[in-house]
């Protein structure tokens, strides 16, 4: 009986997080929890993901508050290099974020490069973010785009393949909002620094 109670107790924080994130853009649900923590799909990712998405090398990926790359279906988040994604960034279905590419002379080798995406960004459906890309805060990437170079100033809309700026946003009109309960994926804000020191390579 004690063993069973102990086993159940370890899931209590997750039950609380389901309630506290239910109205956010990156909610923890029983469905995502079941596929990740029970069945084991993307178990190493410390944020909720869809069972059709693929997350590799989660220890090289740092996400912000309210951000969950791969929560939408069909995403490929490849952390061979390092990936850093800021707070409250939305990532649509079928997005690829690639932090390493094959060597053009020897496909067995990978050339790693950091990918950084800022706060309050919106990465549209079927977008590909290539190695070395850095996007500033409030960058919107239109659906189907391929981003091959940095746009570090942010506050813009990108579109095309390769992506280019099609609109500049007025920074004073861009809204910054905050969740009532702040989570880095499954981890409460006050516990994240300790988790990062122990588990992440970023």
Image (cartoon, rainbow, N blue to C red):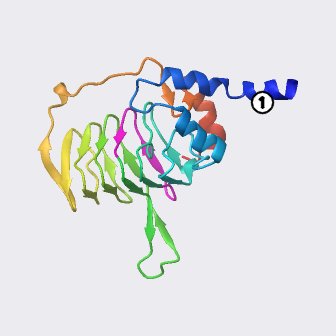
Residue at image mark 1:
7
Relative to residue 103, is residue 86 depicted above or below? above
Image coordinates for residue 90, horizontal then vertical, percent: 35, 39
Q: Quadrant of residue 26?
A: top left
187 in the magenta segment: no
Q: Nearer the viewer, residue 99 or 153?
A: 99
The residue under the point 41% across, 21% down is: 179
Q: Secondary structure at mark 1?
A: helix
**Residue 41 located left or right of residue 163:** right
Provide the major secondary structure of the magenta segment.
loop
Indicate the position of residue 168 as horizontal and vertical percent values.
13, 41
Q: Residues within 10 Å of mark 1 (few under 14, many from 20)?
A: few
Vertical placement of 81 versus 192: above or below? below
Residue name at image x 52 percent, y 21 percent: 19
Instruction: Name the residue: 45% across, 39% down.
Output: 68
Magenta stretch containing residue 87, yes or no? yes
Q: Which residue is the extreme one toward the bottom?
A: 105
Q: Nearer the viewer, residue 199 or 36?
A: 36
| Quadrant in the rendering for residue 86 | top left
Measuring from the top left, give residue 52's x and y in whole percent: 48, 52
In this picture, which residue range is highlighted in magenta? 78-92
Q: Residue furthest top?
A: 180
Q: Residue at x 82, y 28 (%)?
A: 4
Q: Position of residue 15 (x, y in %)?
A: 60, 24
**129 above or below 67?**
below
Total labels drawn: 1
Q: Nearer the viewer, residue 66 or 199?
A: 66
In the picture, residue 23 is in which quadrant?
top left
Query: Considering the image in quadrants, where does the N terminus appear?
Result: top right
């Amino acid at each position: 009986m004690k063993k069973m109670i102990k086993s159940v107790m370890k899931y209590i924080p997750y039950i609380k997080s389901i309630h506290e994130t239910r109205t956010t853009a990156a909610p923890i649900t029983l469905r995502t929890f079941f596929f990740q923590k029970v069945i084991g799909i993307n178990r190493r990712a410390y944020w909720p993901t869809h069972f059709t998405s693929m997350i590799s090398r989660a220890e090289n990926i740092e996400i912000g508050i309210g951000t969950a790359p791969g929560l939408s279906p069909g995403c490929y988040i490849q952390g061979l290099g390092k990936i850093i994604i800021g707070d409250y960034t939305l990532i649509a279905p079928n997005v690829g974020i690639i932090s390493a590419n094959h060597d053009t002379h020897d496909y067995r080798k990978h050339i790693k490069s950091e990918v950084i995406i800022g706060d309050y960004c919106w990465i549209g459906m079927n977008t590909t973010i290539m190695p070395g890309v850095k996007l500033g805060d409030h960058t919107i990437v239109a659906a189907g785009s391929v981003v091959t170079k940095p746009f570090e100033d942010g506050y813009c809309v990108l579109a095309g393949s390769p992506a280019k700026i099609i609109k500049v946003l007025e920074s004073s009109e861009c809204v910054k909002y905050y969740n009532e309960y702040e989570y880095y994926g499954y981890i409460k804000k006050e516990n994240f620094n300790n988790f990062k020191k122990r588990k992440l390579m970023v």
